[in-house]
Image (tube, rainbow, N blue to C red):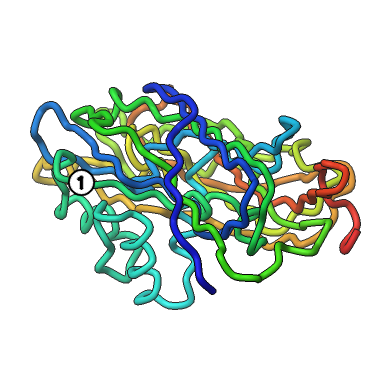
């Protein structure tokens, strides 16, 4: 298949958001839409750690919109991209994919997820030296479910608050979008109905238990188990595939990380044991009628007993897009 790359400048862009338009008067590969030809400036000239999402930390949310203004696909919690990068068939392949997707934002050279943050932190890159590349198709199962399209599409990106990230950084050269135009006779996708998965987030709040002795020292033996039961109404009348659960980390960079364990030892030395990118996955693969009841037990270890923690949920929900009628909705019956 012969193709050529087309440069698409942003229709509008500022430090908060950007909009890119694919006109649809040519055939293009849906799996190769990307941002490139931009650079990041770190005003403090210090190394920066993007976190588990790598350079995807730049994106807060993204939408894929058709000519009529209908949102075909979207992602409002980009933590899902960490899970997607980790779900490779073997550790070696996972490491390679993380390197490609993060693009100079530090590859993983350890098999154990518990060592991921340590490995990445030790290989920080100076943001002033990074020429960025972001695979936008990777953010959308709709685009990955297609092959060749000539549909009009607007891609709307909301940037993360770059000033709040460690050391702060900004675009010194704004990103351009590239698509690959198909020059040969291959036809556009013939399917009128495209079936794909989108990610629907939800979360549950809970508090830690007291683990302190009478003298104020933290004793792990005092840790109590917190048992919670909650009902999710976000997934009614939807086909849910996998559901991912993790404790949300309040860190500014790299959200997918558990709280870990912190306590004082006999030598009065602060020790911290933290697992990184820890999550649980439940394969539901069924139509939800009514609500989902979640029962879970947790042991959150922290000296801050007044803090509210959140159990984050990311669910893969089946969707469909009927191109002839511009209809988008939740898939309720397989194959329909």
Residue sitting at x 51%, y 35%: 20
**Image coords of residue 154 (percent x, y):** 60, 36
**Image coords of residue 113 (percent x, y):** 35, 62
Residue sitting at x 24%, y 56%: 106
Residue sitting at x 55%, y 57%: 280
118 left or right of 44 in image: right
186 left or right of 114 in image: right
Regarding mark 1 in the picture, which secondary structure is present there?
loop
**Figure disc tally:** 1
Q: Name the residue tied to disc 1.
A: 130
Depth order, front residue of 221/316: 316
Can residue 239 be seen from the camera position used here? yes
Residue sitting at x 39%, y 32%: 250
- When asked about the image quadrant of residue 21, the answer is top right
Can residue 221 be seen from the camera position used here? no
Disc 1 residue crowd, few under 14, some 14–19, many 20+, Cα 10 Å: some
The N terminus is located in which quarter?
A: bottom right
Depth order, front residue of 262/98: 98
- When asked about the image quadrant of residue 114, the answer is bottom left
Depth order, front residue of 149/18: 149
**Image coords of residue 259 (percent x, y):** 38, 42
Give above or below for 189 relative to 251. Answer: below
68 left or right of 169 in image: right
The C terminus is located in which quarter?
A: bottom right
């Amino acid at each position: 298949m012969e193709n050529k790359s087309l440069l698409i400048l942003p229709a509008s862009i500022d430090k908060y958001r950007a909009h890119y338009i694919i006109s649809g008067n040519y055939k293009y590969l849906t799996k190769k839409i990307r941002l490139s030809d931009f650079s990041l400036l770190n005003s403090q000239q210090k190394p920066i750690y993007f976190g588990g999402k790598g350079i995807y930390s730049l994106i807060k949310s993204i939408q894929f919109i058709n000519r009529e203004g209908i949102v075909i696909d979207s992602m409002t919690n980009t933590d899902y991209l960490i899970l997607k990068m980790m779900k490779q068939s073997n550790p070696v392949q996972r490491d390679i994919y993380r390197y490609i997707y993060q693009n100079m934002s530090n590859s993983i050279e350890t098999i154990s997820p518990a060592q991921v943050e340590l490995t990445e932190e030790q290989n920080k890159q100076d943001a002033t030296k990074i020429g960025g590349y972001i695979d936008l198709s990777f953010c959308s199962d709709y685009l990955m479910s297609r092959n060749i399209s000539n549909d009009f599409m607007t891609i709307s990106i909301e940037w993360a608050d770059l000033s709040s990230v460690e050391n702060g950084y900004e675009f010194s050269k704004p990103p351009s979008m590239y698509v690959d135009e198909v020059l040969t006779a291959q036809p556009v996708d013939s399917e009128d109905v495209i079936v794909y998965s989108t990610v629907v987030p939800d979360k549950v709040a809970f508090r830690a238990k007291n683990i302190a002795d009478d003298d104020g020292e933290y004793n792990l033996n005092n840790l109590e188990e917190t048992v919670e039961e909650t009902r999710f109404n976000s997934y009614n009348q939807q086909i849910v595939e996998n559901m991912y659960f993790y404790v949300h980390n309040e860190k500014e960079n790299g959200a997918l990380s558990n709280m870990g364990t912190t306590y004082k030892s006999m030598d009065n030395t602060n020790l911290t044991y933290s697992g990184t990118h820890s999550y649980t996955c439940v394969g539901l693969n069924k139509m939800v009628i009514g609500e989902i009841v979640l029962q879970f037990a947790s042991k959150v270890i922290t000296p801050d007993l007044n803090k509210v923690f959140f159990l984050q949920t990311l669910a893969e929900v089946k969707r469909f897009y009927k191109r002839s009628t511009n209809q988008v909705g939740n898939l309720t019956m397989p194959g329909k």
